[in-house]
Amino acid sequence: MAVLSPEPLLQVEGLHKSFDGNVVLSGASLSVPRGCLVSVLGRSGAGKSVFLKCLADVLQPDAGSIRFDGRLLGAEDAAARADFRRRCSFLFQSNALFDSLTALENVALPLEQTTDLFDKEIMERSLEALRQLELDAHCHRYPGQLSGGMQKRLALARAIVTRPELVLFDEPTAGLDPLRRNAVFAMIAKYQRQFGFTAVVVTHDVPEALVASDRVALLDKGRMCFEGIPADFSASNHGVVSDFRDSIAALGSSLASIRRGEATSSAYP
């Protein structure tokens, strides 16, 4: 696991967010130490993606504060928010790759949009990002010509080509089978340590998150009911934590009871 800095890179306090009277976040807070991988867990519909989009400055929270590198990202401080966007990348659940652009062109796009680099340097940095993620041999292929795993790596190459300090991952394993979920978490952990960025991963995949993360948090009813290291999450007796963590065991117990009931009822005509 990473050696954590005592100073958080990202500090979130009391976020609130509602949509048409429907409360999604009701005081969610999170501390993200510099140089670590933090997973935010929660049931489907718990507000994880809304929380992440507030962090990414895609949505504006109704109340609360977000500090990046000690600087408050207030709505009135355009310079602070612009600095944050330069130093942060967002990896969408769907990868958000452009089908009409080659792998190289997809990776180059953020540099073209956010820097004043010359074309030659943009191509060199883009190729280097593809090389680091073992995709340089496929630089002239289109996303539709790549496997699902390669598309994930391509999306990550695009996210890191600007050399961000913080990368936000929105449900990176959604819809994947267990083997591919493991591969995606291994990829995130590997490159997070290799490139030294701080990562926040929103997910509901408990086993993978506990193995890959330095810290985990559990979002429930609009706020974090747990925040700490994976070992403490695994040992926690908190009702919400144990229900979420031990859901597979609970399913097994329920199915055993159902089967016993079926066996009993089958003895009657």
Image (cartoon, grey):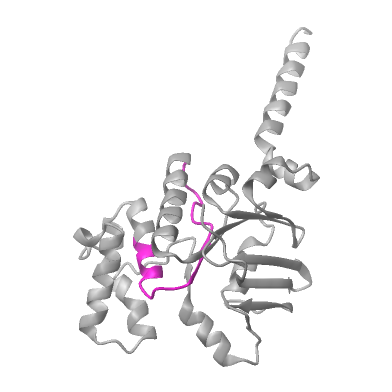
Quarter occupied by residue 154: bottom left
Which x, y percent locates residue 179? 43, 40
Residue visible at 52% across and 87% down in the picture: 82
> Horizontal placement of 65 versus 171: left or right?
right
Inspect this view and state whether residue 102 appears.
no
The relative height of residue 202 versus residue 205 in the rendered view (above or below) is below
User: Which image quadrant for residue 117?
Assistant: bottom left
Rendered location of residue 236, percent (x, y): 74, 43
Give the percent coordinates (x, y) of residue 97.
37, 67
Answer with left or right where residue 97 lies relative to residue 34: left
Magenta stretch holds residue 215: no
Q: Is residue 59 left or right of residue 164?
A: right
Of 172 and 265, nearer the camera is 172
Residue visible at 54% across and 45% down?
211
Quadrant containing the C terminus is: top right
Q: Which residues are magenta?
A: 154-177
Q: Is residue 175 magenta?
A: yes
Q: Is residue 151 above or below residue 122?
A: above
Q: Is residue 192 visible?
A: yes
> Residue 47 placed where, x, y %?
67, 62
Q: Quadrant of residue 37?
A: bottom right
Is 68 positioned to the left or the right of 146 in the image? right
Taking the spot 27% from the left edge, 74% from the top edge, the residue there is 125
